[in-house]
Image (cartoon, helix red, strand yellow):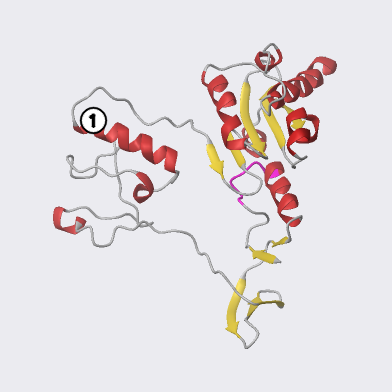
Amino acid sequence: EVTVVDKREQLLSLLDKEIGLHLQKALSEIDLKMVGNTEFQRIEKTEEGVTLYCKGDKVLKAEMLLYALGRMASVDGLGMEKVGIAVDGKGHIPVNPLFQTIVPNIYAVGDVIGGPTLAATSFEQGRLAARHAFGAQTHYFSSFYPIGIYTIPEISSCGYTEEQLEELGFHYEVGRAYYYEIARNQIVGNDPGMFKILFHRETLEILGIHIIGRGATENIHIGQVAMTFNARIDYFIDQVFNYPTYAEGYRIAALNGFNKVKHRK
């Protein structure tokens, strides 16, 4: 049994809230308990293990404790100060849109420059920096890319979350496809999961795609490509997908969402 203590309400607060709640439910089924809105005060080692004292008089005991306070860029020992490069307040190396530091012939990419701190984005940053350094034609780093989280179950997303659309005042609708509706999932073993597609209520343009479940980090790329050419939700309805595949979830979710708009009219 594992207990996660977090000062935030839910795990991975960057996620669409509904997806985050699905993750917590799935993790609870493999004996992982989430204790949110809780801050620790002190940790005490005992003969049995450790005792965690939290604000509000909450006390938790365990055999072992892993304390994770985030990540810091590993820049010590690079000797940057010798060429006049300093880190910012968060310990990251400042760069311009071409990944040049304050010294134009020195570039920095990846986790040392801050978010998004993903392997895939770091690869692309490195490629673009190398092209610019060698005088090859290049472009600025794209602000549109998928996020993949290799939890059990997997999570992947691109575009807006539902909370962001609400804050921005979008007229949006949601299409959902649960994994139990997908034949391939029934064959594999009925894993938990869902497709969630957010789209504009009037124009039908796809605004965000969120997937949790087996194969999420693979299946997200179909939606990513569709969003790059401003596809509408009915684009997925009109496509024929291989059967049985997880990719069918796009069509099921699109039908679910489109029918809500159609009947509202």
Q: Is residue 39 left or right of residue 252?
A: left
Which residue lies most toward the right here? 263
Q: Is residue 24 left or right of residue 70?
A: right
Location of residue 75 with respect to 152 vertically, above or below: below
Mark 1, Cα crowd under 10 Å, few <14 / some 14-19 / many 20+, is some
Note whether residue 184 is visible: yes
Q: What amino acid type is highlighted by mark number 1?
A: His
Residue 119 drawn at (x, y percent): 43, 43
Q: Residue at x 55, y 28 (%)?
A: 221
Residue shown at the point (51%, 21%) measured from the top left = 228
- The residue drawn where x is 70% and y is 32% is 195
Q: Is residue 49 above or below residue 260?
A: below
Q: Specify the quadrant that holds the N terminus.
A: bottom right
Vertical side of 232 occupied by 172: above or below: below
Report which quarter residue 42 is drawn in: bottom right
Examine the image and state in which quarter residue 127 appears.
top left
Q: Determine whether, in the image, residue 162 is placed left or right of residue 157.
A: right
Residue range (magenta): 12-17
- The residue lying at 53 percent from left, 39 percent from top is 147
Query: Percent from the top left, x then y, of residue 181?
Result: 80, 30
| Magenta residues, dominant SS class | loop
59 or 96, which lies in front?
A: 59
Query: Between 35 and 248, which is closer to the camera in this rendering?
Result: 248
Q: Which residue is mark 1?
A: 132
Looking at the image, can residue 97 be seen? no
For mark 1, give the secondary structure: helix
Give the quadrant of residue 53: bottom right
Report x, y in % for residue 260.
Answer: 81, 21
Q: Is residue 80 magenta?
A: no
